[in-house]
Amino acid sequence: MSITGPGSVTAANVLAQTNMMNELDKLGQELGTGQAATTYSGLGSQAGLALSLNAQLSASNGYDATATNVGTTLSIAQSVLTQIGSAGTSVQQAVSGQGAFSLDNNGQTTAQRSAASYLDQILSLLNTQVGNNYIFSGSATDQPSVVATDDILNGNGAQAGLTQVIAERQQADLGADGLGRLVIPAPSGSTVSVSEDVAGSPFGFKLGGVDSNLTGATVTGPSGSPSSISVDLGANPNSGDAIQFDLTLPDGSSQTIALTATTASPPGANQFTIGATPADTANNLQAALTTAVGDLAQTALRPASAMAAADNFFSSDPPQRVAGPPFDTATSLIDGTSTNTVFWYTGEDGSTPARDTATAQVGPSMTVAYGMRASEAALSSLVANVAVLAATTYSPSDPNAEASYHALSQKVAANLDGQPGTQTVSDIEADLANAQIAVSNASKLNTQTQNTLQDMLQGIDGINQNQIGEQILTLQNSLSASMSVTARLAQLSLVNYLSPVTG
């Protein structure tokens, strides 16, 4: 008789089944995660390489996220600049194609009222935020770029706005006698002279030159300090002879006064009567020159003064103001302070180029610069020209109002058209377009890099799903068979193990 005991279900059987179950769990986890290992240690000798590749992939993903954010900012900035440029164009068209000169109850034309509306729109656009960042504030992205339109035009409490700064500047440029700070004394014998009132003063007309074909006259200057011109009529000129005085205005523009000798009495506009003697003619020339200078001061000088004041207000940091009162005899400009003057731009205004105030690394070796300031020349000039229209008023009783307004309109239209050699809004747009191209190229390169890195990691840490599926199926079959046999063995009793006695 032979007996086989129930101990046939051995620990080895159980261990083998446990190992198969563990392997089945591992394969199931690999199939679920798509990874051959959940820890770097599970990769063995490839762990270091996988760690390096993952670090590069993480960095590339970071660059890609940065590129996306910068791209969004650039797209919004381009849209804003387009709207600002369109507003400037609309103002230019309004003042270029204006009809009859007609003032409302506030002393302004339709084009000026439109300019005030466009100014508000432009300033609002300059305070655009992307996320929590003011994109036209340079590096101070947590600060608004510009103050409110009403504060800029009308001031805020003790802080003077543009309207007051223009009024003070016009007093300084016109002078107490309305002759644009020129001195035209009574003739000395047959000599007529004209001079600037104070050497080095920034205000009023400046003598640019003189051109004469007056018969027998000796003309000198401009020379001296303050600059002066003298015309000595050694003999009476002939009818039709002329003299021309060239004047420079506060905004850098120029005007010419041309006076022609005539025998008519009284003379016509821009003429002087030839007298009985050179001294008489000198008196007539001096009177004609005084009248012409006074007329030019009321028509061309006033808008030039307003433009100069706007430039001092918007383009200087700190803004410049007339050193007064009194203003009509002032001889210099002074810095405005935050106590007495509105500072229209409230962002960062350092020496760093505007684009460099915001930079971002969008690739391993690629950085883009995309900062902007509302105080950039193109933007501050546009704001100044629109604002000067919005800030200026005229009196219906002023006989020179229409001529002065048209002179201002012409200046604004020309400035908004862009001056050679000066920055334009299109220049800023072009800078940002280059940054957009760089960001786009970086994004494409980042995508290529990510795909390459992911392929390499897949080769190290990836799995073959078909192969894993086959292994799982094989293990499941083996485990099922093993457990079936084990179960059958475990069900045997001692009687089942007794073999029949043979004898």
Image (spheres, rainbow, N blue to C red):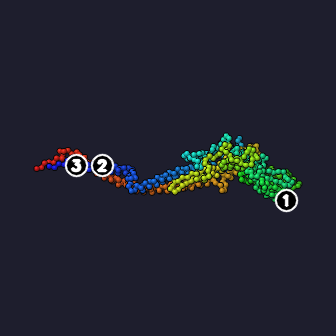
**234 up-or-down from 374: above or below:** below
Q: Is residue 486 left or right of residue 169?
A: left
Q: Which amino acid type is marked by label 3?
A: Ser
Element at label 1: loop
Instruction: Tell me the tag on residue 184.
Output: none
Q: Which sits earlier in the primary sequence, circle 1 or circle 2?
A: 2
Badge 3 vs badge 2, beta-carbon distance below 8 Å: no
Q: Position of residue 129 (x, y in %)?
A: 57, 46
Badge nearest the viewer, 1 or 2:
2
Q: Nearer the viewer, residue 200 or 413?
A: 200
| Residue at x 52% of width, y 54% of height | 362
Q: Position of residue 184 (x, y in %)?
A: 81, 51
| Residue at x 60% of width, y 52% of height | 352
Q: On the image, which quarter does residue 210 sit in?
A: bottom right
Badge 3 vs badge 1, beta-carbon distance below 8 Å: no
Whether residue 117 is visible, yes or no, is: no
Q: Nearer the viewer, residue 295 or 56?
A: 56
Instruction: Tell me the tag on residue 8.
Output: 3
Q: Nearer the viewer, residue 399 or 145?
A: 145
Q: Which sits earlier in the primary sequence, circle 3 or circle 2?
A: 3
Separation of residues labelled 1 and 2 (CA atoms):
127 Å
Mark 3 surroundings: few (<14), some (14-19) or many (≥20) residues within 10 A: few
Residue position for label 2: 18
Q: Position of residue 64 (x, y in %)?
A: 50, 52
